[in-house]
Amino acid sequence: MNQGDICGENSMAEGPNVRQSVDVRSATAEDLLGIQRIAVLTWRSTYAGLIPDTDIETFWTDAYDHERLRLMLDWLGSGLIVAIEDGEVIGYAMTGRNRDRVAELFAIYVLPEWQGGGATTLAARVGPRL
């Protein structure tokens, strides 16, 4: 899988102003490339200038490779949740039980151009699942 596949520049619409509706559901294996793409873009956007670019690239390459994502999907099951708009993954959340068996939102990531809209929808719909 090459970086162009992960971060396709033209694969998103023009951001939140053109969204029709956001669907939130449990992730499937078909969503893993979209989850990986979101991880790459959000880490680059959020941590640029704070963490060296090489460290960001090393992190997402290791933490979000396809095999690790498949293991994450197996481990979290329905706790790996995606937000879908117009057939494309625009955000994801990882939920489950922590060591104390308490429901926890481990992570939530939304494409930068959807933050403030997609994040609210995803977080609101994840809450009841915990």
Image (cartoon, rainbow, N blue to C red):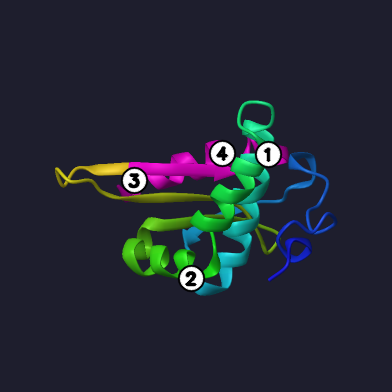
Q: Is residue 7 left or right of residue 99?
A: right
Mark 1 element type: helix
Q: Nearer the viewer, residue 24 or 73?
A: 73
- To which residue does mark 2 refer? 67
What residue sits 58% from the left and 50% below the top? 58
Label at residue 53: 1
Q: Amino acid at mark 4?
A: Ala
**Which corner quadrant of the image does residue 4 belong to?**
bottom right
Residue mark closest to the camera, 3 vs 2:
2
Residue mark closest to the camera, 1 vs 3:
1
Q: CA distance from mark 1 to mark 3?
A: 36 Å
Residue 69 placement (x, y as % from top left) = 48, 64
Q: Which residues are magenta?
A: 105-130
Q: Amino acid at mark 1?
A: Asp
For residue 123: magenta?
A: yes
Query: If you read the primary sequence from the N terminus, does the residue marked by circle 2 or circle 4 appear first?
Result: 2
Residue farthest to the left? 100
Label at residue 119: 4
Q: Amino acid at mark 2?
A: Glu
Name the quadrant of the N terminus: bottom right
Q: CA distance from mark 4 to mark 1?
A: 25 Å
Query: If you read the primary sequence from the N terminus, does the residue marked by circle 1 or circle 2 appear first?
Result: 1
How dense is the environment of label 2, judged by Cα within 10 Å: few (below 14), some, or many (20 and up)?
Answer: few
